[in-house]
Image: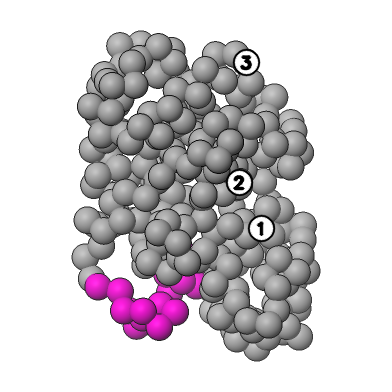
Amino acid sequence: MNANEIHARFLDIARPISPELAQAIASIGPIELIADRSSPFADRLCRAIAGQQLSVKAARSIWNRVVSSDNGSLVEHLAAVAPEELRACGLSAAKARAVREVARASLDGLLDTNELSELHPAERSKRLTAIWGVGQWTADMMGIFYFGDRDIWPEGDVTARKTLTRLTSPRRKTIRTAAQFAPNRSLLALYMWQQADNIPTRQFFGIHIPKGMDDEPIGDAFLNRSIFSDCASGANMGLGQRCKNIFSDKLFTGETNRINNKSVF
């Protein structure tokens, strides 16, 4: 199905669920999911981990320092570098360990892009989340934005989940609502992120969002146009994508990264 056909189908599904949901989808119009594999998978995954829950400027600055310390293959460098050197670049101890674990997994042949692209998203997520510091949210984002999987509903993404709740009902389970949009649930997530960006006032879920967010902590879906799309321009990010972590029930959104009772954050 092309974007126009999917848009029409989404409207048919949304109308009996909620007029507000249907109106939001109608106002956004057809939308496309374009995967970005412009950099090696392991490199992108490490960059995603390094930049989570930081401001746009801080994420860019830290990653530039990490890359500038590399004299060859990035994954070989990250696998061999001392944690103290990564800490000196600005990574937390947990993030330093996580990117080194990803690099080692890559060198062990566990992150071959061609092999991963052939896996079912659930199987790929299982492989990725077996790596220390990689959680389900990160696996979902890589599936959507790197591999272009069309049927992932990122239930752990606070903005996607809360926007869908706001457009339907708090009594509806978002995962059940999203299931009605299979096999294109990734596109439903794109609609929810775009809807969050399109809010006409600077009010989101009843919380005021100040202008000029480039120096503020960023949340989950920021990564779909920056880290996951290999673009670090804060000017290209919308309201929902820069500010989602404000609405989390915890200090950070989406990605808890709990592996062996450890957390990246």
Q: Provide the residue designation for mark 2.
A: 136
Q: How many marks?
A: 3
Q: Can you give x and y, in whole percent of width and height, for residue 144 in the image?
A: 60, 47
Mark 3 is on which residue type?
A: Gly
- Tell me what residue is drawn at x 35 percent, y 14 percent: 81
- Tell me what residue is drawn at x 35 percent, y 56 percent: 218
Q: Can you give x and y, in whole percent of width and height, for residue 82 in the image?
A: 33, 16
Q: Which mark is residue 153?
A: 1
Badge 3 marks a residue whose secondary structure is loop
Q: Nearer the viewer, residue 207 or 140?
A: 207
Q: Any magenta on residue 79?
A: no
- Tell me what residue is drawn at x 51 percent, y 39 percent: 262
* Residue 208 appearing in the image: yes
| Residue 174 image-quadrant placement | bottom right
Which portion, as a residue range, is magenta? 193-210
Q: Is residue 215 left or right of residue 238?
A: left
Q: Any magenta on residue 201?
A: yes
Instruction: Assess whether mark 1 and mark 2 are in contact (beta carbons under 8 angstroms).
Output: no
Q: Which mark is residue 109?
A: 3
